Amino acid sequence: MARALMVQGTGSNVGKSMLVAGLCRAARLRGLSVAPFKPQNMSNNAAVTADGGEIGRAQALQAMACGLAAHTDMNPVLLKPESERGAQVVVQGKRLTTTRAADYAALKPTLMGAVLDSFNRLRAQHDLVIVEGAGSPAEINLRPGDIANMGFAEAADVPVVLCGDIDRGGVIAQIVGTQAVMPAADAGRIKGFVINKFRGDPALFDDGYAAIARMTGWRGYGVAPWFADAWRLPAEDALDIASAPGAAGHHIVCLRLSRIANFDDLDPLSQEPDVRVTMLPPGQPIPADADLVILPGTKSTRGDLDFLRSQGWDIDLIAHHRRGGRVLGICGGYQMLGHSVSDPMGIEGPPGDTQGLGLLNIRTVMGDDKRLTETRAQHCALDLPFTGYEIHIGRSTGPDCARPFARLDGRPEGATSADGRVTGSYLHGMFADDAFRRAWLAALGAQPSQTAYASGVDSTLDALAAHVERHLDVAGLLALAS
């Protein structure tokens, strides 16, 4: 069986995913067959796998770092929030149930078997598995039945390294405090720590670094400075999407919905130097200089229609369209553009109907038949092929479907308004196709670059591995794996 090492964090968004991706690529460059693993992830930004399932987008990036195709075993439990109190539970790529947060604690222990099955399959196929925790092991209220952090580490007998984020401040308290609240047996599984996201001269933290080692008894494995090229990698969080430094030109505005999902559509666009991507936060009006407004995917179409209206974005969209602006709806965003969204079975919440925005002459009915597949389609207006993926429920029909966005296996897909300025499609990932992205941007009046998106991500992973090798004791970390 392969050796394994687990990276846990002092909290969410401390850089665990990026660190694991860097270690995975570094291990691969050392000649090891390595695979990523995250027992439990909570994210609506999912990736479709070749085996017909879905996993967290961060694990798909880590798989790329390992030179592997994404597989459902890499993230056996995926929680996809549908409301403030409930989430869809996906196990080994397939929807198991929808549960309230209060009830998930009772469900967790039943999932450990699937988690360990997936982990052991990866261990049987590779030299090394690098595991990413979720949240923080300091959340001791979640320790009973835990499958994400120390519960998994104990069940799989995997050593742990703790990652702290100095950029948010208080990193000494983060790490020392984590040890202070943990049961002794859990603290004993932690073999060392790393400091992440340092800005400035790391030597200025020498005394703090030594203090952490002294107070915890854990060995330090280095201080990693902020990785300046992180923006070139697919974002796990919509807040992390940023345009290329100095980007100007065509202004694309994406509405940051409350249940935004599969927003990786924005990553390739954000790297175009003549495109300025704005992830519009709640409380701000749609800018008058927007050339295109994107309504992205969402885990709760009807819920986010209500959210969109509460921001006044429905009024802004009508004004944007009246000024001659363009609108693109993707997946749930496409559904919102129609006259109505009906959910008679209560798939995404209480059964009922919600009035849409009326910018497309279509109507959508939700069903329990979820489509999860990689696709190759032909864009109708450009007469160009492109690759992407589908991950949605619901069926949209109406007169505007007679002007499809694309053709998929010979059948029409999506819809276009009579004036041609409002389009919708269920297809994600289309802008990662370089030839299609360039032609699509040119048709909008932008100046596309010769950016090769996938190879750019791959070269950035090499740079991340070099960054990790330069600043951390990678040999020491890999030696911990057992």
Image (tube, grey):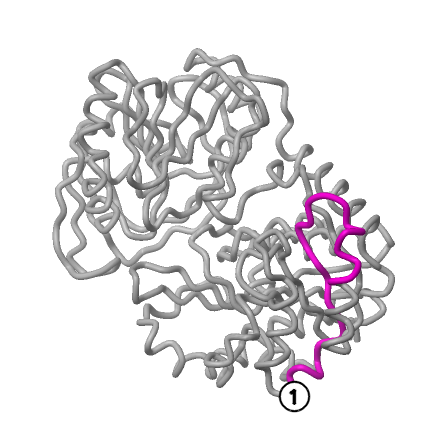
Nearest the viewer among 161 and 397 is: 161
Give the quarter of the figure containing the N terminus: bottom right
- The residue under label 1 is 184
Determine if the magenta segment contains residue 280.
Answer: no
**Which residue is at 59% across, 26% downward?**
245
Magenta segment boundaries in residue numbering: 185-208
- What x and y, as percent, mark residue 184? 65, 88
For residue 137, side relative to residue 184 (left or right):
left
What amino acid is at disc 1? Ala
**Which residue is at 63% across, 64% downward?**
132
- What x and y, as percent, mark residue 384? 48, 21
| Above/below status of 383 relative to 404 | above
| Above/below status of 227 relative to 22 | above
For residue 362, side relative to residue 381 (left or right):
left
Crowding at dot 1, Cα within 10 Å, few <14 / some 14-19 / many 20+, comes out as: few
Determine which quarter of the picture holds residue 318: top left
| Above/below status of 31 relative to 175 | above
Give the quarter of the figure containing the C terminus: bottom right
- What x and y, as percent, mark residue 478? 82, 65
**Which residue is at 48% across, 33% downward?**
430
For residue 146, side relative to residue 467 (left or right):
left
Determine which quarter of the picture holds residue 151: bottom right
- What x and y, as percent, mark residue 462? 76, 42
Nearest the viewer among 438 and 7 is: 7
Secondary element under disc 1, as helix, strand or loop, is helix
**Which residue is at 52% across, 35% downward?**
267
Determine if the magenta segment contains residue 187.
Answer: yes
Nearest the viewer among 192 and 112 is: 192
